[in-house]
Amino acid sequence: MHIYKWDSTLSTHHTNIDQDNHEIIRKAQHLKNLMADGTDQKKIKEAADRLENMIYNHFEQEEMMQLYSHFSNYEAHKKSHARFLKALNRLIHSIRENPCESEHLESLDALIQDQYFNHIKEYEKEAAKFILQRDFYHN
Ligand SMILES: [Fe+2]
C-alpha cells in the first residue's frame, strides 16, 4: 500500500503551514489505513470528518494570513483551494455514504498524493515565501 510521506520538497519554511501539512498528511494516512482495513465504518467516517475539518481550517487560516500580508497571488491561490475543496467534498461525501468501498483508496491517493502535494508545491511555497518576507520587513 502506498504511504503518504512528508519530505523536504513539501517544505514551505513557514512553521505553521508546515505543521498543518504534516497533520493533514497524518490524518489522510490514518483514514487510508482504516479504509484499507475496512472493518470499522464508524471510525472511517470519523477520520474522514476530521481530515475534512483540518483541511478547511488550514485553508481558512492560510487565506487570512495571505490577506493580512497583501499577498499578490491571493485570488489564484483561493481558486486552487476552491477546486481542491470541491474534490474533497465529493470524496468525503462518498466515504460517508459507503465507507468500505475499495475505490475510495485510489481516489484518496489522487486527492492527497497528486492534487494536495501539487497544491503545496505550486501555491503554498510561493505564498509562504511572500508572507515570511513581508513579516521580516514589517516586524
Ligand atoms: Fe493553500
Image (cartoon, rainbow, N blue to C red):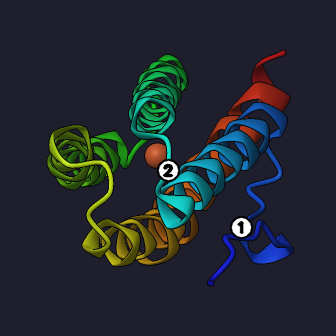
Q: Residue at x 32, y 57 (%)?
A: 100
Residue position for label 1: 10
Instruction: Say what amino acid the circle numbered 1 marks.
Output: Leu
Give the mark, 2 or 1, whose residue is nearer the N terminus.
1
Residue depicted at x 69% and y 33%: 134
Q: Is residue 106 above or below residue 76?
A: below
Q: Nearer the viewer, residue 3 or 10?
A: 3
Within 10 Å of the Cα at label 1, are there few (<14), some (14-19), or many (20+) other Cα atoms? some
Residue 64 in the image, given as x and y percentages of width and height:
46, 18
- On residue 74, the disc is none
- Secondary-structure class at tag 2: loop
Q: Position of residue 24 (x, y in %)?
A: 61, 44
Give the label, 2 or 1, closer to the camera: 2
Q: How many labels were placed on the picture?
A: 2
The residue shown at (20%, 42%) is 89
- Residue type at numbered disc 2: Thr
Give the residue drawn at x 56%, y 61%. 37
Q: Nearer the viewer, residue 69 or 29?
A: 29
Query: Can you say which quadrant of the picture contains the N terminus?
Result: bottom right
Residue closest to the eye, 53 or 123: 53
Quick check: 120 above or below 27? below
Q: Tag 1, which secondary structure?
A: helix
**Which residue matches tag 2?**
39
The Cα atoms of the two marked residues, 2 and 1, are separated by 32 Å
Q: Position of residue 122 (x, y in %)?
A: 48, 70
Percent x, y for residue 110? 37, 76
Are the residues flagged by discs 2 and 1 in contact, CB closer than 8 Å?
no
Q: In which quadrant will I find the C terminus?
A: top right
